[in-house]
Amino acid sequence: MGISGLIPFLLMLEFLVPPAWLTPLQPICDPRVMDKYILEAQQAEQDIGSFCATSCALLEAVLVPDTKVNFLEWKMMTRARQASEVWGGLALLLTALGRAQEGPPATLPSFRDQVARMSSTLLSVKEILRSVNVEAEARSLHAAPTPSLTIHTVEKLLSIYLNFLRGKANLYVTEACRSYAR
């Protein structure tokens, strides 16, 4: 094949093989991603609740983020303050899940698997939050304290985990994605 045959061949390849840069990236701002994590958290709460019928006490009290959201106050907060609460809350939850694996319920394989999935989900949420600049926003506030509470049971940890995903994390990602769309 000479030069005259090479050009038609390359043109034909152009239409058969799409260029890599046209491949869409994972849609971080697709609300179904956070909805999936929230649904998984609800399922985890039900699954663990079934074998913690009365109470699964943690080995020691753990600090978790306060997940109560006053929507009016949330909207009035600066973006940096919102980011600080979300980023700090994520760190507290990751630490609390690690501590939950040390207690008596951790002897149950299903509990360990569920906590591992929850930790994995939080790490995925962490990457989503990084992609919408939460870490940089939070640093701009110079480490403001994250509102927190102390808990003693696995059930309360699961409730906090679910409320965090459904509340502050979801609110922050949704608003960040809206601002990117503008």
Image (cartoon, rainbow, N blue to C red):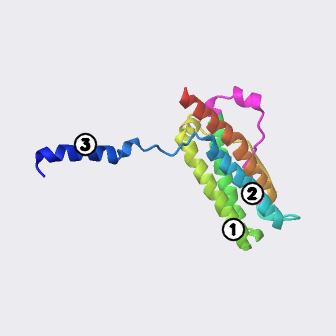
- Secondary structure beneath label 1: helix
Residue 134 in the magenta stretch? The answer is: no
| Disc nearest the viewer among 1 and 3 | 3
Whole-percent x, y for residue 37 in the image: 66, 50
Mark 3: amino acid: Leu
Compared with 137, 120 (above or below) is below
Part of the protein shown in magenta: 61-81
Tell me: 104 left or right of 54: left
Using the image, tell me which numbered label, if any, was put on residue 11: 3
Residue 117 quadrant: bottom right
Mark 1: amino acid: Arg
| Cβ atoms under marks 1 and 3 closer than 8 Å | no
Task: Indicate which disc, 1 or 2, sits on the residue closer to the N terminus.
Answer: 2
* Residue that numbered label 1 is attached to: 112
Whole-percent x, y for residue 71 in the image: 76, 31
Q: Badge 2: few (under 14), some or many (20 or more) residues near its Cα, within 10 Å?
A: some
Instruction: Give the camera-side residue of 151 and 123.
Output: 123
* Residue that numbered label 2 is attached to: 43
Compared with 39, 47 (above or below) is below
Residue 15 quadrant: top left
Residue 68 in the magenta stretch? The answer is: yes
Compared with 140, 53 (above or below) is below
Whole-percent x, y for residue 51 in the image: 82, 67
Task: Indicate which disc, 2 or 3, sits on the residue closer to the N terminus.
Answer: 3
Q: Which residue lies furthest to the left in this view?
A: 2
- Secondary structure beneath label 3: helix
Residue located at (87% from left, 65% from top): 53
Mark 2: amino acid: Gln
Instruction: Give the camera-side residue of 132 and 141.
Output: 132
